[in-house]
Every structure is written in C-alpha cells, then in structure tokens.
C-alpha cells in the first residue's frame, strides 16, 4: 500500500501567533517547543571530540562498549537487569524510531496501531506511513482485536502522566491477550516532580518486577532530555531480543546507523549520572517558578507530575488561550496538536532559560486570570 497523505506540519499554523508574541515590547518567550537550551555537558562534548577520526562505517548494532553501557544504564537507572547486546539497539534519536516502527515491524493495511489520547503526533504518523489505522485509546479494555502495535508514553508528552507498575502490568497483559507488540516511550523518565516520583524511580516497562519474560515488549529512550543531546540524535530501543533482531536486520539493509562519534558520546553520557542530576534540578527550579504563575493567571494544571511540560487549561478553546498568551509575548502549544480529546488544553515547555521563565512568570502574574 502506498504512503497515505500526511497532514501539514502542525507547528506551521502557529506563525500568526508567533508574530503577535514577537511584537511584545519586551520580546518573545517561546515555551512551545521542548528543545533544550542548556549546554551539552563538557564530558560528552569532549567524548565526541575524541572520536572524530571516524573513517570506517559505524555498526548498526552499536559498539560493544555502547551496548554494555545501555545495559548497565537500564540496570542502574531503570530497574531492568539482564539486558545483553541482543536486547539493545542505538537509534538516530527516538522520533525516527517512533515514526518508522510500524513499517519496520511489517504492519500495513488492516492492522491497528493504538496510542495515547493525549499524544505526540508521531505515533499516528507512524501508522499512516505503514498504511495502518491509528486509534487513540488509553483504556486497555477498549483496545480492539486486530491491534498489532500499542504505544504508551509514560511519562507522557504533553500531559506528564505516569503509569505506575500495576498500570504497566495491566497494559502488558492486555497486549499479550491481543498478540500485539507494546512499546513504552520513556524519554522523560529521569524527570519526576510530584510524589511519589519526586523520590521514587519512574517505572520502566522493562522493570524486573514485571517479570523476566519481555516477549513482545520494548522500551525506547532518548538522551535529548536528560543530557541536552537533541542535536546529537541519540536514542535507544531495548527489550524483546526477537524484535531487536528484526529491527537490526531491516536497519542494516536500510543503512540506519548512529554515527560512530555519537556512539562514543552516548557511551560516556550513559555512564555519568551527575550531569543528569544537575540538569534535573535546573528543570525543577524552572517548574517551581512557572507553575504558580500559570495558576495565578487562571490556568489549572492537569497531571504534569513528570516530564518537560505543563499541561494546563483555563476552560476555553486552546486557540483562545494561545491568542491570550501571544498578547503577553508567550508562545505555547495548543492541545489540538496532541489529538482530538483535549481541545481546551495547552502545553508549555520548561526548556527555556532561567531568565525567560522568569519573564514569562512575571507577565502571567501581572495579567491575572483571563475572562472566560
């Protein structure tokens, strides 16, 4: 089946609101995109520089040190032991894997891909690329027969929702009843804010407590958030060795491989927890400034217990909220970009400088609640 027509890129529709925000006398504060603004840690930049003599083709599966670092990181930070080289694979960031996974797994016409109701658009785009149907549904009991691939996203983008261990267990069980592959997009797992995730690790779908059998189960991760490596394109997929083997084979044929210098940089990044802890505290402080300012301006914070975003509503259509914020010189993302279920929500990112977060908070506090 030919590639289905894809929608226009949604962020292009923000152009007139961006123009309004830029006209603010004190300038634009862009909280719409979750792109890191802080420096890539020196330990990682030095590792990249060390590996620039990369004259040979890199391996698709990753170097032995990188695969060992991935397994050690999952054991140390995600509670998932026993992940050997056959269980892990580096990817060119996580977005390409999300968008290509249905195709790489051989899905097509007549197959269903399930994803979250509040969702990063690439889950649905991946289904369209493969010619499959996409269903936004959070309730495992409502996942239909014919489902071949299930995406969950914990912590969630845009809503910052976290599924606990029992909720993950129920989702894995239902996927197995359906004979479907289940994948948790865990890219924000190091960024927990509210209890219990302020002091407990956010569970992985590969957590040992869910059992040793990882058949049909994958977890994906990105270093973009924890290590400010968005520009490096450094991602990971791990889990079922049979699924990993299939992905390796297809990716070898397609030439999908992480550049050699980046593989070395990833190895170093995964072995150093100190820079991750430091970055987490920067985001924690920014959240502590922005969240109460949004509440003072009449917004209700929903979920948002983890991750890089605040998912908020003031009870009006999201485009009206976007227009109101644009008049304050602030840009956010409308809930319409994240599925059909949340037309009154907007998403604001914590990936702005301390100064910009302070500027946005001051404008919100000065504005007060908007008329609804």
Image (cartoon, grey):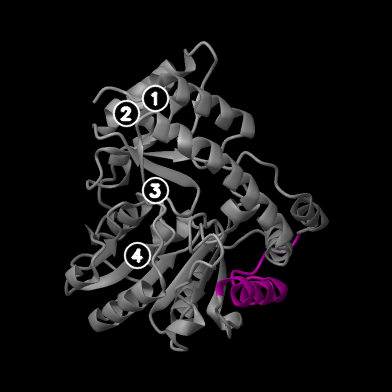
Of callouts 4 and 3, which one flags the residue occurring earlier in the amino acid sequence? Answer: 4
Of badges 1 and 4, nearer the viewer stands: 1
**Disc 4 marks which residue?**
151
Quadrant of residue 342 in the image? top left
Is 58 colored magenta in this rendering? yes
The x and y percentages for residue 255 are 54, 63
Q: Secondary structure at mark 3?
A: loop
Q: Is residue 353 left or right of residue 103?
A: right
Q: Residues within 10 Å of mark 3 (few under 14, many from 20)?
A: many
Q: Residues within 10 Å of mark 2 (few under 14, many from 20)?
A: many
Identify whether 141 is placed above or below 301. below
Residue drawn where x is 41% and y is 74% of the image: 165
Q: Is residue 305 visible?
A: yes
Of callouts 1 and 4, which one flags the residue occurring earlier in the amino acid sequence? Answer: 4
The x and y percentages for residue 359 are 56, 25
Of callouts 1 and 3, which one flags the residue occurring earlier in the amino acid sequence? Answer: 3
Identify whether 141 is placed above or below 302. below
Q: Is the Cβ of the residue at disc 1 closer than 8 Å to that at disc 2?
A: yes
**Disc 1 marks which residue?**
325
Identify whether 142 is placed above or below 93. below
Front-lying residue, 82 or 327:
327
Q: Residues within 10 Å of mark 1 (few under 14, many from 20)?
A: many
**Marker disc for residue 158:** 3
Front-lying residue, 28 or 214:
28
Q: Is residue 329 visible?
A: no
Q: CA distance from mark 4 to mark 2?
A: 29 Å
**Disc 2 marks which residue?**
321
Q: Quadrant of the N terminus?
A: bottom left
Q: CA distance from mark 4 to mark 3?
A: 14 Å
The x and y percentages for residue 221 are 52, 63
Of badges 3 and 2, nearer the viewer stands: 2
Q: Which residues are magenta?
A: 55-78
């Amino acid at each position: 089946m030919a590639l289905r027509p894809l929608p226009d890129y949604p962020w292009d529709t923000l152009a007139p609101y961006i123009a309004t925000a830029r006209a603010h006398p004190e300038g634009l504060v862009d909280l719409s995109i979750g792109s890191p603004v802080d420096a890539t840690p020196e330990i990682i930049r030095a590792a990249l520089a060390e590996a620039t003599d990369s004259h040979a083709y890199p391996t698709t599966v990753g170097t032995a040190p990188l695969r060992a670092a991935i397994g050690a990181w999952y054991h140390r930070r995600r509670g998932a032991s026993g992940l050997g080289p056959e269980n892990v694979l580096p990817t060119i960031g996580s977005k390409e894997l999300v968008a290509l996974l249905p195709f790489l797994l051989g899905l097509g016409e007549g197959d269903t891909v399930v994803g979250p109701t509040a969702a990063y658009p690439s889950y649905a785009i991946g289904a369209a690329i493969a010619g499959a149907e996409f269903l936004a549904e959070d309730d495992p009991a409502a996942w239909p027969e014919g489902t071949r691939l299930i995406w969950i996203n914990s912590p969630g983008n845009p809503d910052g929702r976290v599924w606990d261990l029992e909720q993950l267990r129920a989702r894995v069980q239902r996927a197995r009843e359906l004979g479907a592959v289940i994948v948790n997009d865990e890219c924000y797992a190091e960024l927990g804010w509210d209890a219990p995730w302020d002091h407990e690790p956010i569970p992985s779908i590969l957590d040992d407590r869910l059992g040793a059998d990882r058949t049909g189960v994958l977890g994906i991760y990105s270093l973009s958030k924890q290590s400010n490596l968005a520009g490096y394109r450094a991602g990971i997929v791990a889990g079922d060795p049979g699924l990993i083997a299939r992905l390796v084979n297809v990716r070898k044929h397609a030439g999908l491989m992480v550049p050699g210098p980046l593989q070395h940089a990833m190895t170093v990044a995964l072995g150093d927890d100190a820079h991750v802890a430091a970055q987490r505290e920067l985001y924690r402080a920014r959240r502590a400034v922005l969240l109460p300012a949004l509440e003072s301006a009449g917004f209700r914070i929903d979920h948002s217990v983890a991750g890089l975003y605040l998912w908020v509503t003031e009870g009006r259509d999201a485009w009206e909220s976007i227009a109101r914020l644009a008049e304050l010189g602030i840009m956010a993302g409308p809930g319409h970009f994240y599925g059909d279920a949340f037309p009154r929500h907007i998403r604001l990112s914590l990936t702005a400088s301390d100064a910009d977060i302070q500027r946005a908070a001051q404008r919100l506090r000065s504005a007060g609640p908007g008329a609804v």
